Image (spheres, rainbow, N blue to C red):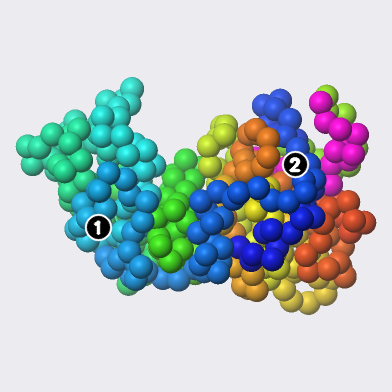
Amino acid sequence: MEEDESKDSSVLVFAALALVGVVAVSVPVAGVASLALVSDMQASAGGCTPATVVSGEDSEDGVINVPNGWGPLVEEAAKTAGLPVSVAAAQLKQESNWEPRAGSSAGAQGIAQFMPDTWAAYGEGGDVTDPEDAIPAYGRYMAALRNEVKPLAGDDADQLVRLTLAAYNAGPGAVAQHKGVPPFAETQRYVEAILDGGQVEFSAGCEAPTGGKAWDGDLGDGEWSAPLPGGKFTSGYGRRNVPGLPEWAQNHVGLDFATPGVGSRPGGPVIAPTDLRITGFNETDGCVIAKEDGDDPDFGFAFCHLNSWGVKKGQKLTRGDVIGVEGNRGQFGMSTHLHIEIYKPGAPDVVFPYQGFNIDPEPILREKGAWPQ
């Protein structure tokens, strides 16, 4: 993110009512503490810039953060699968956190979580708990899934990556039935989490594995779209009485939405409800700050507690473009949700809450047809 903003001593103050009865609030601090890996990488790269990595080609700077010397195995498996190497690395981490002997109650085993029948088909007699056998087998299996869904993607390399990941999670039959990423919250979260994880954790240049990312679901019939597709309203704007919160934080200056059943895991895609221009960031609370890009009024926005994001300052987004992934980033423990603020027209490009610019987002979202169903 932009270095001058991520290290500003007047870190934004955001208060949010978390789910499942857990209260979370971010408070003012004198400066930003050491940032997480995602922040360090994004700062060093000058911001994460979405850029297409052609399916089957490694990023120019290579893969990073693959443990135990398995990087060459992952690179070779990615070539076999026809996937960006950062995606392959992110998927293997998602499946097992790089644990060769990982297992699940459903019977999945190894670093790529093979089910017994799948391992029998692609393991070539190897040991499912040995990464030197399992990672190449993962490449062969993903190549088979890619070939199954390729007719649906046509010449769209970005969509082919998405469909291949969806086929792994939901099965190629579900992808074929829905002619795209199935409308299952778990599958959509899985695809977005891996794409974002590949960009910010495993790509040395912070390169997005797919470009022009847009949510491929229904944008709704309104003038705007709901910022968290499939999310449910959980906390409103204004005065509240939450035990344990300081007095100033009882004034909730935004709305909270959450994908049901996520808990503290990465949630669904957070999308641009209308055409936006990215104006800043707050690393500590996972906030992307934006202004409406187009005709008056030029409302301001903050999308907070994101798990990850792949936009940069000055970038213009079209309604439906993905901003990031719903998360629980903040100074205190909280369940995964999206905290959204809207600022009155004429507010500065980068505005803090409690500065007199906040307005209730609910009537605006309802009027624009962007209230969740």
Q: Which residue is drawn at 62% across and 40% down?
A: 328
Residue 37 in the image, given as x and y percentages of width and height: 51, 51
Estimate how packed mark 1 is, as few (under 14), some (14 to 19) or many (20 or more) residues with alpha carbons within 10 Å: many
Q: Determine which residue is flagged by label 2.
A: 26
Residue 313 in the image, given as x and y percentages of width and height: 64, 69
Confirm whether the magenta stretch covers residue 166: no
Residue 270 in the image, given as x and y percentages of width and height: 60, 53
Q: Which mark is residue 75?
A: 1
Q: Which residue is drawn at 10% across and 37% down?
A: 126
Estimate how packed mark 2 is, as few (under 14), some (14 to 19) or many (20 or more) residues with alpha carbons within 10 Å: some
Q: How many marks?
A: 2
- Residue situated in front as seen by the camera: 121 or 371: 121
As helix, strand or loop, the secondary structure at mark 1 comes to helix
The amino acid type found where label 1 is placed reads Glu
Residue 39 in the image, given as x and y percentages of width and height: 56, 55
Q: Residue at x 22, y 61 (%)?
A: 79
Taking the image as shown, residue 3 lies to the left or right of residue 175, namely: right
Confirm whether the magenta stretch covers residue 254: yes
Furthest residue in direction left, as rendered: 125
The amino acid type found where label 2 is placed reads Ser
Q: Is residue 198 above or below residue 45?
A: above
- Residue situated in front as seen by the camera: 33 or 161: 33
> Which region shows up in magenta?
244-258
**Screen quadrant of the N terminus:** bottom right
